[in-house]
Image (spheres, helix red, strand yellow):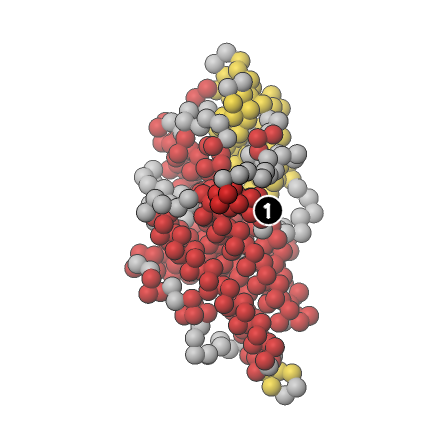
């Protein structure tokens, strides 16, 4: 199909370019090129096969996407806007691709960076930034998703070591991770541990029959009396505030990422509408189709400008967790609705893999739930406004 030549592209309608610095534009350009050249040609086959392109991880590392927003230890030190734009471009391909980078960067590496010892940082962060070590983040449990305070995984002291017992579920990268950041309840409260692949009693399990996020590695972690040395405990992590700080950090990337999926769906629908002829004219000439495109574009533009505004607040150290909740909730809602409406523009063709939209829609059903459900973020915003907790 020929590219649509309208007066304005969707990106021009958003108007980001004049609001970005040169380094931010360069990050967007580099990630877009990598996604277009290396990931897009294989994403349909990978999704159908339930496979993540693990062999391409070194290429993500090469352009600085692993640990992108961290300073030192071989990390790129990107600002919030540049990192957000990177997540945006990754998710134009697939949510699973952005999720890999988000979990590696904003959860596993951030936990070590924020709460680890200097020795832990020096050992793991350069390896993870180079893609030689993959991490995962073990907080969610089979019976405790939105209420992590109910976690049942235990860590008990045994001399200078800790014995970890429990199970984590819906863990991105679980089956391929070299290390897991595992959160467990102790007699002194919740603590974080670096659990390495190969430790006796530690294993990962598959989650079969996924109908969303199929091009993402998602599994469970089993801890059956795993002996972890004291030096593998994150010394600065105390209580639930530590894992929740990691989640707050990760939600920011999700909020930028889902708009990449929404933008991709809108671009596909626009192109299709201009190419597809019915009743003797392109369906793009029909008022009801233009209504759909205009409505979707309006919401994507508003969400994109909100994301940039909050990224600048984060850059200045002024972003409140409730604002992150608002951003994640708003953008996930808009992206999911955009994908659904774009699918309808394509009619029956909208369910075909070659057009990508239904794959995005299925993935966005997961983003609507993970890193805090829509309902939980609603209550977080409500608590910030009223001072009363409705959890």
Circle 1 Cα neighbour tier, 10 Å, few/some/many (<14 / 14–19 / ≥20): few
- Vertical comparison of 16 with 7: above or below: above
Left-right relation of 269 to 242: right
Q: Residue at the bottom extreme?
A: 280
- Vertical comparison of 172 with 359: above or below: above
Image coords of residue 217 (percent x, y): 58, 45
Question: Going 43% across and 57% down the picture, which residue do you hit?
Answer: 306
Q: Residue at the top extreme?
A: 159
Image coords of residue 26 (percent x, y): 34, 59
Left-right relation of 119 to 371: left
Q: Which quadrant, please, contains the C terminus?
A: top right
Q: Determine which residue is flagged by label 1.
A: 375
* Residue 6, visible in the rendered structure: yes
- Vertical comparison of 128 with 11: above or below: above
* Residue 179, visible in the rendered structure: no
Question: Going 55% across and 34% down the picture, which residue do you hit?
Answer: 138
Looking at this view, is 104 or 364 the one in front? 364
Looking at this view, is 215 or 307 the one in front? 307
């Amino acid at each position: 199909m020929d590219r649509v030549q309208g007066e304005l592209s969707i990106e021009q309608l958003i108007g980001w370019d004049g609001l970005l610095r040169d380094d931010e534009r360069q990050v967007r350009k580099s990630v877009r090129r990598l996604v277009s050249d290396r990931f897009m040609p294989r994403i349909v086959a990978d999704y159908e096969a339930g496979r993540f392109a693990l062999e391409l991880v070194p290429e993500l590392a090469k352009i600085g996407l692993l640990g992108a927003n961290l300073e030192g230890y071989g990390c790129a030190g990107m600002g919030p806007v540049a990192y957000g734009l990177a997540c945006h471009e990754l998710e134009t391909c697939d949510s699973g691709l952005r999720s890999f980078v988000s979990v590696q960067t904003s959860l596993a590496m951030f936990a070590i960076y924020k709460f680890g010892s200097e020795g832990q940082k020096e050992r793991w962060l350069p390896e993870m930034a180079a893609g030689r070590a993959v991490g995962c983040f073990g907080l969610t449990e089979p019976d405790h998703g939105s209420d992590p305070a109910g976690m049942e995984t235990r860590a008990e002291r045994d001399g200078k070591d800790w014995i970890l017992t429990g199970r984590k579920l819906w863990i991105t990268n679980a089956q391929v991770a070299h290390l897991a950041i595992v959160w467990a309840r102790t007699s002194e409260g919740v603590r974080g541990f670096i659990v390495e692949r190969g430790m006796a009693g530690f294993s990962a399990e598959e989650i079969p029959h996924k109908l969303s996020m199929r091009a993402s590695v998602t599994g469970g972690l089993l801890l059956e009396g795993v002996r972890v040395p004291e030096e593998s405990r994150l010394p600065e992590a105390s209580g639930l505030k530590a894992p929740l700080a990691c989640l707050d950090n990760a939600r920011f990337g999700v909020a930028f990422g889902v708009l990449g999926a929404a933008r991709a769906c809108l671009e596909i629908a626009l192109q299709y509408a201009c190419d597809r002829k019915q009743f003797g004219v392109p369906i793009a000439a029909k008022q009801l189709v233009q209504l759909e495109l205009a409505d979707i574009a309006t919401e994507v533009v508003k969400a994109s400008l909100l994301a940039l505004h909050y990224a600048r607040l984060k850059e200045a150290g002024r972003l409140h967790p409730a604002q992150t909740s608002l951003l994640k909730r708003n953008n996930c809602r808009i992206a999911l609705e955009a994908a659904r409406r774009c699918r309808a523009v394509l009619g029956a063709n909208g369910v075909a893999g070659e057009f990508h939209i239904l794959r995005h829609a299925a993935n966005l059903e997961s983003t609507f739930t993970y890193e805090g459900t829509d309902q939980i973020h609603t209550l977080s915003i409500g608590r910030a406004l009223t001072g009363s907790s409705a959890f």
